[in-house]
Image (cartoon, helix red, strand yellow):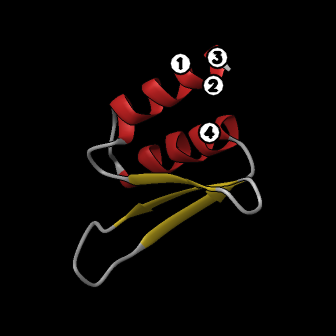
């Protein structure tokens, strides 16, 4: 649990300004949503927080949004 909390803190610090990050209670799914422009919507979905973190890292490199 402590590792998850540390990872969540890291993810929020790195991507929280650009992405809205949430976890659903139904099936355990993590979601990140970003609106780079009013007409654009980027959505990332993962079954675990480490998986979402990897996807956010790839998306930030692709979009030019570095750390």
Badge 4 or badge 1: first in the primary sequence: 1
Q: Is residue 57 left or right of residue 46?
A: left
Badge 4 or badge 2: first in the primary sequence: 2
Q: Disc 4 on helix, strand or loop?
A: helix
Q: Real-space Cα distance between discs 1 and 3?
A: 5 Å
Which residue corresponds to mark 1?
6
Residue 62: give x, y in percent of width and height: 46, 52
Q: Looking at the image, which is closer to me, 12 or 44?
A: 12
Residue 20: give x, y in percent of width and height: 38, 55
Quadrant in which residue 61 is drawn: top left
Mark 2 nearby-residue class (10 Å; few <14, some 14–19, many ≥20): few
Quadrant in which residue 2 is drawn: top right
Q: Real-space Cα distance between discs 3 and 4?
A: 16 Å
Which residue corresponds to mark 2?
4
Q: Residue at x 63, y 60 (%)?
A: 45
Q: Residue at x 23, y 73 (%)?
A: 37
Residues at badges 1 and 2 in contact (C-beta under 8 Å)?
yes
Which residue corresponds to mark 4?
54
Q: Real-space Cα distance between discs 4 and 2?
A: 14 Å
Q: Looking at the image, which is closer to me, 26 or 36?
A: 26
Q: Residue furthest left?
A: 38
Q: Is residue 3 left or right of residue 5?
A: right
52 w.r.t. 4: above or below: below
Residues at badges 1 and 3 in contact (C-beta under 8 Å)?
yes
Which residue corresponds to mark 3?
3
Q: Disc 3 on helix, strand or loop?
A: helix
Q: Residue furthest top?
A: 2
Q: Residue at x 37, y 53 (%)?
A: 19
Badge 3 or badge 4: first in the primary sequence: 3
Residues at badges 3 and 2 in contact (C-beta under 8 Å)?
yes
């Amino acid at each position: 649990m402590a590792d998850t909390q540390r990872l969540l803190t890291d993810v929020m610090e790195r991507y929280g300004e650009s992405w809205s990050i949430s976890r659903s209670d139904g099936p355990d799914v993590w979601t990140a949503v970003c609106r780079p422009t009013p007409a654009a919507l980027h959505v990332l979905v993962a079954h675990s927080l480490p998986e979402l973190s990897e996807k956010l890292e790839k998306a930030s490199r692709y979009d030019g949004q570095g750390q």
